[in-house]
Image (tube, rainbow, N blue to C red):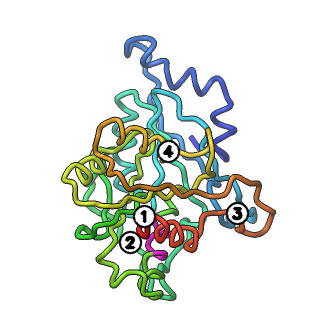
């Protein structure tokens, strides 16, 4: 199934009924499906300029994912279909800006990823993608926020805030319904002195997903004392520009505030 906007899908009471019927009937009435939600975050597609960057509510019984690159999307889609066959409701949120993105820095073609031809290659809900694994500071994001974080990291090097990109690790967490196991594993060894959660959704109550990560990791006792959260401004976006979307400067400034205290 394909939907245009997440709020339109979430406001439909029938979707909620589909999402919880497997649980309510003790698996006697499974409604397994994969739903693609298009038009999320910034970007132009189909002649429309998209400005929707809120995920209001993820009901129990729904697995929500937002991928940052083509390779993981294919691997994750295979897993989504397998989960749907077992009765789960899986929702894939597509970041508009990523649909035709080729370059990470200048014209490097750094965001063109290979198609995983091995049909047995899946990406589970617990899997994450790491960009670096030896730093003392970590940025956690998903979807288009991963690209923003990678560009911000390069900017920090160019401004001589950090010596090299090796100083900062970035973890891409596509599964945003709950804390993925891969993130728990990365934090459990106590490597990171600072963690910045970088959310492409709006800041404030009921608008983003990574704030629930913070609460959960704090309760589990694996969140370091020095952490921070940055998200898009809680404001409506003027049509035709991206002034209120999370950008590289937002992430860089949040990083400096976190690490300089």
Q: Position of residue 3 (x, y in %)?
A: 63, 43
Label drawn at residue 211: 4
Q: CA distance from mark 4 to mark 3?
A: 19 Å
**Residue beneath disc 2:** 113
Residue drawn where x is 67% and y is 40% of the image: 7
Q: Nearer the viewer, mark 1 or mark 4?
A: 4
**Residue beneath disc 1:** 70
Residue drawn where x is 37% and y is 32% of the image: 85
Q: Earlier in the sequence, mark 4 or mark 3?
A: 4
Range covered by the magenta-colored residues: 146-152
Q: Earlier in the sequence, mark 2 or mark 1?
A: 1
Q: Nearer the viewer, residue 63 or 120?
A: 63
Q: Position of residue 110 (x, y in %)?
A: 42, 80
- Residue 126 is left or right of residue 102, and the answer is left
- Exactly how many numbered labels are in the figure? 4
Q: CA distance from mark 2 to mark 3?
A: 29 Å
Residue drawn where x is 59% and y is 52% of the image: 201
């Amino acid at each position: 199934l394909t939907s245009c906007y997440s709020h339109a899908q979430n406001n439909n009471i029938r979707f909620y009924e589909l999402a919880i019927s497997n649980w309510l009937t003790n698996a006697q009435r499974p409604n397994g499906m994969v739903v693609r939600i298009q038009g999320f975050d910034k970007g132009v597609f189909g002649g429309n300029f998209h400005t929707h960057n809120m995920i209001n509510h993820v009901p129990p019984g729904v697995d929500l994912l937002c991928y940052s690159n083509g390779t993981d999307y294919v691997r994750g889609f295979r897993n989504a279909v397998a989960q749907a066959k077992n009765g789960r409701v899986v929702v894939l949120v597509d970041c508009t800006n990523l649909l035709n993105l080729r370059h990470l820095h200048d014209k490097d073609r750094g965001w063109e990823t290979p198609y995983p031809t091995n049909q047995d290659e899946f990406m589970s809900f617990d899997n994450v993608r790491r960009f670096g694994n030896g730093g003392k500071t970590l940025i956690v994001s998903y979807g288009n926020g991963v690209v923003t974080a990678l560009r911000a990291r390069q900017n920090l090097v160019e401004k001589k805030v950090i010596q090299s990109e090796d100083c900062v690790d970035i973890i891409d967490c596509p599964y945003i319904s709950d804390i993925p196991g891969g993130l728990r594993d990365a934090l459990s060894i106590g490597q990171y002195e600072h963690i910045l959660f970088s959310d492409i959704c709006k800041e404030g109550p009921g608008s983003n997903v990574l704030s629930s990560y913070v609460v959960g990791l704090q309760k589990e006792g694996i969140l370091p004392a020095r952490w921070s959260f940055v998200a898009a401004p809680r404001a409506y976006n003027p049509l035709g520009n991206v002034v209120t979307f999370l950008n590289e400067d937002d992430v860089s400034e949040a990083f400096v505030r976190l690490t300089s205290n």
